[in-house]
Image (spheres, rainbow, N blue to C red):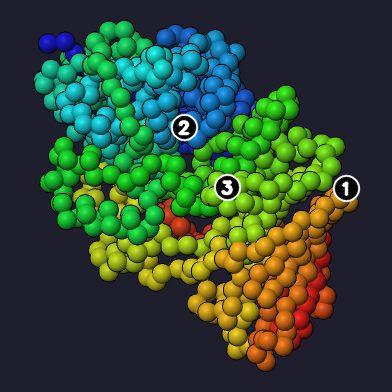
Amino acid sequence: MKPLDLVFGVHFHQPVGNFDHVFDEHVRDVYLPFLTRLAEAEFLPIALHVSGPLLDWLELRNVAYLDLIGRLASEGKVELLASGYYEPVLAALPRADRLEQIAWMREALRRRFGVAATGLWLTERVWEPDLAGDLAEAGVRYALVDDRHFLVAGFRQGQLHAPWRTEHNGRSLALFPIDELLRYLVPFKPPAETAQYLRGLRAAGHRLAVLADDGEKFGGWPGTKAWVYERGWLTQFLETMNASRANGEIRLVTPSQALREVPSGGLAYLPSASYREMETWALPPEAALRLIRLEADLGAERLAGPDSALVRGTHWRNFMVKYPEANRMHKKMLALSALCRRRGDPPDARRAIGHAQCNDAYWHGVFGGLYLPHLRHAIWHHLAVAEGVLRAGELLACEEVDLDGDGHVELWVHCAAFSALVSPTRGGAIEEYTRFAAGVNYAAVLTRRREAYHETALAAAQAAANDNGGGGTPSTQEIEQSVRLTQLPPLDAEDRALFVDRMLPADLAQEAYASGAYQPLRSWARAAFAATVRSSSEAAEITLVADGLTKVLRFANDGTLAVSYRWEAPAVPHGVVFSTEVSLSHPLELRTTPPAEAWSFPIATVAKSERGLDQTVQGESVTLRWPAAAGGVMIAVG
């Protein structure tokens, strides 16, 4: 009996904007020891993907590690995989940007390591059918996707131990299904279980098994450093696998070798999909809870069978609906990318847009992602750099556009100094206020919203802690299931932005206001304002009128801002307070006439992370308050 061909692939990545010490710790604790141990044990060849942001960091901080990769690649012991350079979700990019991101990566690998990479690590395994043609045009011969992508299309598990072919517009691409069970076995279970599983595949007559997953799980995720290195999992794994190789049970091959030697399974057309957990995370909270209840009703035995793949969540793009903050970043990136193409693609702007396409800050799962302010601010910083280049010397202008794609018009005010987005249909609030010199969007604050895991963590607080039985270390799925919460965190009833306007009761306490546990007497946060724009080379003035309130935003061409309000004071009951809430990602000076009482508090979210649940300060709420009898106020923004 021939040995089972095993493709063993790892993906190393750190996002744009991550802390320097995180890069350093992962190189020291994960990337270097893992690759070194594999080389020492001659557990090679393997497939390896190193993302562009990590390559850039290594070029500056640890060239020796790149030299190790280069030596192994030159000896045919490592097959390097391409991707989009800055680790974007390719399906979320315009076609020209997809091709460019892959070209950047292939050129970097050719220049640094002398290889022509023709395989692709598909970021977050987010697949859409039209990718096939673009990947083929970009010089990609094969891509790695989850076996689940095939299962949701009706394939049987036993069919998925071979490369398959797909096409789009006549351009063909090979697809390797990644074995989900192997992803859960390695490194979370004892190595003997992996060996037994591979032995079973061989006995069943299968030719190929493919494992490709995040390399950070070999020491970077909670508990894995102690499990993989200190408690000897990696030593045992290498000994076990090498014993299987020695007795002819398995053979390590590269994906390119498997593509040459293992017969194609045939033609496959895959639906839009990602991995199992991602499709759940992208659901709205109420729908995610329904899915959890449905899975509980079906039971573990049913879900272990072939019907499991047909029970699924939604696609990655739904994060843009679930999180308006992610959608604003994404649609601003798309708008600037198109503007950059129209203006001849100045390299500084194009590279900044490439950085801003890094996927991590656009979604949220078991790790922080969108909930990590430093990742979101990095995206906005690169968008500010790009727009500053593209608008150099530009005069003040105000465009009517549906920038976020929701069917409602926004007002995009911009010039050489700043860019701002005003939403007349959402209370005339300012949803973006970016000053290019500072490289900051002052409105980039996350709304406190309910997540499905808040509910499940609260319910789980009464249950006993997870018992792993000493048979391994928790996987991300088990970490996710183990989070506990003793009370639900505060919520915002309305989306955060700059200048969200309300009438408040006189007896409302600041503590209740900060918790979100109050009812305003009146809120304009979701009111549709009629907007009139007057602009000149000196300033753009937007007058917004709705339901007894007139709000005037005056943007000067140097990026400064003045806001004024008028309302019918006699119609307001005595003691009522007029307020406007300004949710700031970075400090801004606010000068008021007449003087205002200011309430402020940190905007903190409770979100899932690799450690469990983290409280993270997303910015500061500053609420300016006046007696409603004043009838009108002014605010100068420094």
Image x and y of residue 622, in percent: 68, 69
Which one is earlier in the sequence, the residue at label 1 or at label 3? 3
The amino acid type found where label 3 is placed reads Asp
Q: Residue 316 appears at what percent x and percent y?
A: 42, 41
* Quadrant of the rendering where the C terminus is positioned: bottom right
- The quadrant of the rendering that contains the N terminus is top left
Q: Is 14 or 132 nearer to us in this picture?
A: 132
Tag 1 residue: 537
Q: Residue 529: horizontal and vertical position, in percent?
A: 65, 64
Give the label on residue 91, or none: 2
**Residue 132: % across, % down:** 41, 21
Residue 142 position by quadrant? top left
User: Disc 3 marks which residue?
Assistant: 404
Q: Are marks 1 and 2 in contact (CB under 8 Å)?
A: no
Q: Amino acid at mark 1?
A: Ser
Q: Residues within 10 Å of mark 3 (few under 14, many from 20)?
A: some
Mark 1 vs mark 2: in front: 1
